Amino acid sequence: MRITNLQLEAYKRDGFLTLEGLFSLLEVEAMRAELERIQKIETDHLVRENGSNIAKTIYRVHEADGPTASPVFHALSRTSRMLEPAQDLLSEELIYIHHTKCNLKTAIDGSVWAWHQDYGTWKRDGMPEARPITALVMLDEPTEINGCLYFIPGSHKVGSLEPEFNDATGYKFFVTPKDKLLEIMARSPEPVAIKGKPGTVVFFDCNLLHSSGHNLSQHDRWAIYVVYNPVTNQCHDVPNPRPDYVRSINTKSIVKGSDNIFFT
């Protein structure tokens, strides 16, 4: 599935591109069933909500080995529906997966992710340039009450901002400082809520400012994030690197597979 020139222009302008209906409801159900299975596994590849057994984040579901390995997600990440748009938007044919992350925002308990750029963390992984693109696969319908993602359109054009470390929400990661964020917001379009039906995929730039709120609804909101990076932009060695499940050492370029995620 190739990206049109108009779609590419929209991506360059806004920093994100929404492709509706990329995956069927049957495929979405297969993905949800895999997450139901994986979240019962005890492993450091999985983060739980503070003080509970509720899974919050699951990593490294795209590989063929490891405790969170999944044939469904391995196939998903290599379908033409995912791989070709990523190649087109990156203007690169040789790309690999830096990591996969499954966010499970459970009803009532699903917590905040503060405003940030993803590259703020990845440059500390030894990634030379802000090149990666993330593919968000919706497994539930995001709404504002269930903690959908928000983007600041065009904010990727500000470049890579120096982040600050934050663990106030119970998840330790690098966020955009408030004073810098307010300065950018003052001259940017209003943040937009990222919504869509299950099976929708949203590709977004690693410097795009984004966040999400609490899930205040009675329904879970699940989503998968697949991060594609050019092979030429693979991480160099750094002291005390993060583990492989968040900073992949498998930088071999992906070979496109079947579009059938059930039997590949």
Image (cartoon, grey):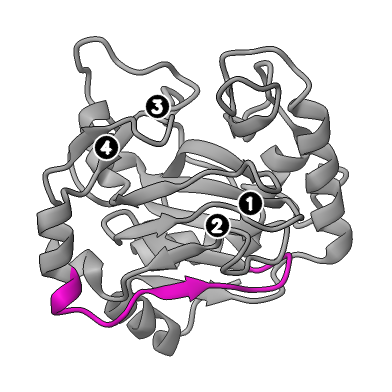
Say whether residue 58 is left or right of residue 187. Answer: right
Say whether residue 46 is left or right of residue 113. Answer: right
User: Looking at the picture, does residue 142 appear above or below residue 244?
Assistant: below
What residue would you read off at disc 3?
Answer: 247
What residue would you read off at disc 2?
Answer: 136
Quick one: label 4 or label 1, which is nearer the N terminus? 4
Q: In which quadrant is the C terminus drawn?
A: top right
Q: Is residue 132 visible?
A: no
What residue would you read off at disc 1?
Answer: 223
Q: Amino acid at mark 3?
A: Arg
- Label 3 near label 2: C-beta < 8 Å? no
- Label 1 near label 2: C-beta < 8 Å? yes
* Magenta region includes residue 159: no
Measure how far apart labels 2 and 1 are at the Cα level. Answer: 7 Å
Q: Amino acid at mark 2?
A: Leu
- Label 1 near label 3: C-beta < 8 Å? no
- Label 1 near label 4: C-beta < 8 Å? no
Residue 121, percent from left and from top: 28, 36
Image: magenta residue range: 185-200
What residue would you read off at disc 4?
Answer: 174
